[in-house]
Image (tube, rainbow, N blue to C red):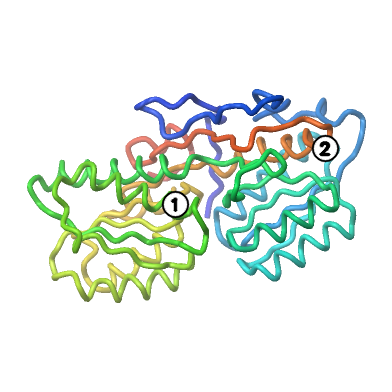
Amino acid sequence: MQKFHPIRSLGVVVATAACVSMVAMPVAGASSNPPGWGSPSPSLCHGKTYTVGIDIYSQGESFATTTVTSIINAASVMGCVTVKTLVDNASAATALSNIQTFINEKVNGVILANVVQSADPGLLSRLHAAKIPVVTTFISPEPQTSSAPFIDVNDAAAGKAGGVALAKNFEKKHPGQMPYVIVGAFPEGGPISVARMSGFASGVQSVVSGLPSKNLITIDTQAAPNVAYTQTADALASIPKGSYILFAGINDETTNGMYQAINAAGQIKYASAMGMGGDPSGVYYICHEPSYFGSVGFFPENYGNYLLPAVIDMGHGVKLRPTDFFQSAVLTSANVKTYYHSASC
């Protein structure tokens, strides 16, 4: 798959009706934005060298690999950071082992990018006890705290924007028709994952007036394409043949698993998909799968520009806000080349 290069770097934007993300309010004594926010540079090094550990949930999923690459690229720009990556494969026990490895190796900071909410308290407790700075992404600590700031998109708003865009496109093409909606959830991911897919459902409902409750079907994809395929195939048994279907999964690869199940059932010509994440796989699907209408772009290739400076800043005593959101955007074949010149639409 080709590598896509973004045109626009992301900034923090103030929430308005036209935006899908917003700025968190600063806490007392916290920096408005950490030094180097969005712009890693050698000036952040303060003449020192650092080792930063990444605990990532997958070594093969497109969003995960793109995020890790972005952190490595940011480290290269800074010139003073060595990145050590360990994969937990969405296992709480493996994540705990990875964190202990980082502690034993006395890393200078950790970027926690796991997806199992139940693992977070134990992981953060050990890191705090070892006095190792940590920033989190993908899964937000509960409660949110400046000691483990969460840096990501606003999942609820991003999910809703995707649902609104998909439903508006449906109503434009099929006025007066009532679709079925399949929501590919990932409850194991905790409140952030739930907010993303609840946002998608509420976005569709805000456009499709009077959507019957029986037409809204939620499945547990476990964030795995093969599980998404099986669960979607089962859900299709309750949907009459020839019905219109709107659907989305927790990420692009899960959404594609759902897409393949609907295609195998001969229903894809009646269906329309909205991915989540807009990673390279999602951009590819937008351009090459006719019923893959769009994906909410989180721009994972830019995550490192925020996460790495943030964890280095924490090591210098900078107090961050509990939550910082950055911008997302709904990508479709009509606008994707605005963000990715080499997209093959």
Q: Are marks 1 and 2 in contact (CB under 8 Å)?
A: no
Query: In which quadrant of the rendered image does the C terminus lie?
Result: top left
- The mark found on residue 126 in the picture is none
Q: Amino acid at mark 1?
A: Gly
Q: Which residue does the numbered mark 2 point to in the structure image?
A: 315
| Amino acid found under the numbered disc labelled 2 | Gly
Q: Is residue 186 left or right of residue 98?
A: left
Q: Nearer the viewer, residue 95 or 63?
A: 95
Q: How many neighbours does mark 1 have within 10 angstroms: few (below 14), some (14-19), or many (20 or more)?
A: many
Residue 18: percent from left, percent from top: 36, 27
Q: Which callout, 1 or 2, points to the residue nearer the camera?
A: 2
Helix, strand or loop under label 2:
helix
- Residue 57 location, x and y as percent? 62, 61
- In the visual, does 89 lie left or right of 259? right
From the viewer's perspective, tell me whether residue 208 is left or right of residue 35: left
Q: Which residue is mark 1?
A: 282
Q: Looking at the image, which residue is at 70% across and 57% down?
A: 55
Q: CA distance from mark 1 to mark 2?
A: 35 Å
Which residue is rendered at x = 86% and y = 37% of the image? 80
Q: Looking at the picture, does residue 285 appear above or below residue 6?
A: below
* Residue at x 35% of width, y 44% of height: 162
State which tag comes first along the sequence, 1 or 2. Answer: 1
42, above or below 208, in the image: above
Residue 60 occupies which quadrant of the picture? bottom right
